[in-house]
Image: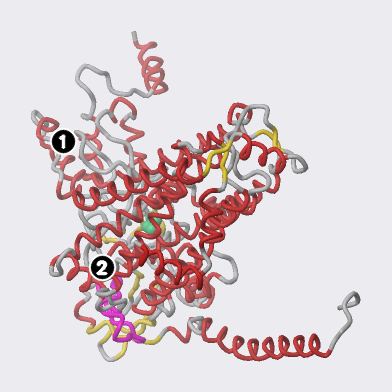
Amino acid sequence: MSEEKPLTRRWLLLAVGAAFNGIVGVALAVPVVGYLLSPIRKKSAYSQWISLGSLSQFPEGQTRLADFVNPFKKPQDGETAKTPCWVRRLSADKFQVFAINCAHLGCPVRWFPQSELFMCPCHGGVYYANGDRASGPPERGLFTYDYKLVSGELHINAGQMPTLADQAKLVTIDGKGKSPCLG
Amino acid sequence: MSRIKRLYNWFEMRLQLEGPVKDAALHPVPRNTASWWYVFGSAATTLLMLQIVTGILLGLVYVASGSEAWKTLDELNHQLYLGWFLRAMHGWGSNFMVAVVLVHMAQVFTFGAYKFPRELTWILGVFMLLMTLGMAFTGQVLRFDQDAYWGLGIGASIMSRVPVIGGALVDLLLGGPIIGGATLSRFFALHVFVIPGTLLLFTAVHIWMVLKLGINDWPMPGRVVRRNTYLQEYHELSHKDGVPFVPDALWKDLFFSAAILAAVAVCAFVFGPYGPGGQPDPTIIQTAPKPDFFFLWLYAVLSYLPPSLETPFVLIAPVIGICILLALPLVAGEGEKSWHRRPVAILVLVTVAVSWGIFTHLATFTPWSPIMDAWSGDPVPPKLIHDASPLVRQGAVVFQAKQCRNCHAVGGSGGMRGPALDTVAVRLTEDQLIRQVLQGGGNMPAYGKNLSPPEVTALVRFLETLKPDGQPPAIDATHQEQKAQNAAPQQ
Ligand code: FES
């Protein structure tokens, strides 16, 4: 380390002092990294069953806009704690619940009952009534939420903003059970 | 007088700044660098100061909370004395700062200023450009309105495409499961502490190096930079034919900075503050989010890329671009500085500037976005259906009611996502029209399931009338041939 300079007692103490600072620094910094990374959670930790309200709001054969308040809402979220979604009722107990976010880059898609298409205002992505991709830049169909019917109410499993990262997993999980193309 | 002098001496004895300041002020610079071309760096610094001052003034009122931010901006705009003007100064200051930083960069690139020994000055400058853009983006988020909300959604969606760690990056960006209060807080911390702190530090080092290494000499064709001779040559240039930096060069810097500040103030006064737009309520979905000016080009590029190229482009192109900028002075640290002898460099600069301009221009009217209310807002021009049969009129109704208009213009209004249809009958035959309607193709969805056969017939009849007077409709050549063949034997 110091072949040219003789290692005096002072230099040794300086080195020890520096090392001491390093150790304390690392001991303090490592937990702080954990603090910084704390928003990273599994999808399951960020979702919960939420009621969209009574089934009677959703007439059969139609697609309606619904919204829910995020289950992990904090006071400082204000209005952003609300999330809209599209509910398509196929029959008495068959539903499709689509995320509002376009599968391209997350803009809010709008449903047009006349032409039975979802259109995205950002880059012109279009989806069919069953959520399949129709045209434009999206690589896949609309994101869907899992749903269940609980005593006359529609519940969905939601809580996290749907993106390609968390939805890709979702598709593989329920890929065998429910086909995304019911229409 | 002597009292002032004594006061000065009291401080000077303790601070001992006179020496270094005099050195910095009077150091000789090559005569022709005292030029109007060399004023952009100091103007950028002035704008940075303006942003800090106006930012602090806004910080006295602004509350970085998802539930309060929009309201405090509204209060600044409408209730506080000069609040609107300070917001406007900060917003326009940001625009000017990005613009001046880009011009500064283009100028030092053109003048070969990144070459030896100023490589590190350039590299720091690249990071400073990134931080300036980072300030512009995070600032747009702090204006917590609809555009900010959906803009964050776009940011998160881009992040989510990163392989493997995409999900974690989205969580980090948003600070939680959704775009909300936590997201705004972390962008506030970035915009107010992290980025400006680093930017100030980098600015100080950047300017320090300009002072220590001397301002880049005016490039002359044939005056080639070589590592072993340059320092000597520069010393001669600045000492034999030099002028003191103060006042010979600095007066131009001062004039330009003042002019830029005045321009910011005029823009702020005339055009007013940016937004805030609609409240950040995600359930109001009647919105078409759009980024601020300096990110419009990105918006255009994202719309035009084919889907398969998008993820690689968005994730890899910026990395490559930044690496090229960082590597530039290390790879091309020697050689000619003059633009007369660097045609490729100048061509690259012009290409980048022109494509940036074109993409930005396109993004100002977003031809790729459907116009979401054209179907209900823009009626079919009456002259198109003036003498039309009932069936054709029915077709015009289908055309409106099925939102065709959102993507297709007729008579100069409607979306531009698909081609305008004013002359479609000249281009497509009946069969082709039917096929296009039923099966879609290109960027058009298939309407097969969404139209009844009578609706298709009516729509196609209407489309067949869309041609300029006196021009024949499109005909199917094979059809004609067959008809002719069928007809021939009978005659
Ligand atoms: S975000 Fe919907 S098409 Fe791009």
Name the secondary structure under disc 1: helix
Q: Quadrant of residue B243?
A: top right
In the rendered view of the protein, which quadrant contains the N terminus of chain A? bottom right
Q: Nearer the viewer, residue A60 or A157?
A: A157
Judge whether B174 appears above or below A157 on screen. above
Q: Nearer the viewer, residue B22 or A173?
A: B22
| Residue B291 visible, this orientation | no
Q: Is residue A117 left or right of residue A105?
A: left
For the residues carrying marks 1 and 2, which lies nearer the camera in this image?
A: 2
- CA–CA distance between discs 1 and 2? 30 Å
Q: Is residue A21 magenta?
A: no
Judge whether A66 appears above or below B361 on screen. below
Give x and y (percent) for residue B225.
70, 37
User: Callout 1: residue from which chain?
Assistant: B
Q: Are marks 1 and 2 on the same chain?
A: no
Ligand 1 is found in the corner quadrant, namely: bottom left
Q: Quadrant of residue A153?
A: bottom left
Category of crowding for the residue at label 2, using alpha-carbon neighbours closer than 10 angstroms: few (below 14), some (14–19), many (at least 20) = many
Q: At 40% from the left edge and 71% from the top edge, which residue is drawn?
A: B192
Q: Which residue bears the numbered disc 2?
A: A63
User: Callout 2: residue from which chain?
Assistant: A
Judge whether A132 appears above or below A144 on screen. above
Name the secondary structure under disc 2: strand
Q: Which residue bears the numbered disc 1?
A: B392
Give x and y (percent) for residue B264.
29, 50
Q: Is residue B176 left or right of residue B218?
A: left
Q: Amino acid at mark 1?
A: Val
Q: Is residue A65 magenta?
A: yes
**Of the numbered discs in the image, which one, if any, rests on residue B33?**
none
Category of crowding for the residue at label 1, using alpha-carbon neighbours closer than 10 angstroms: few (below 14), some (14–19), many (at least 20) = many
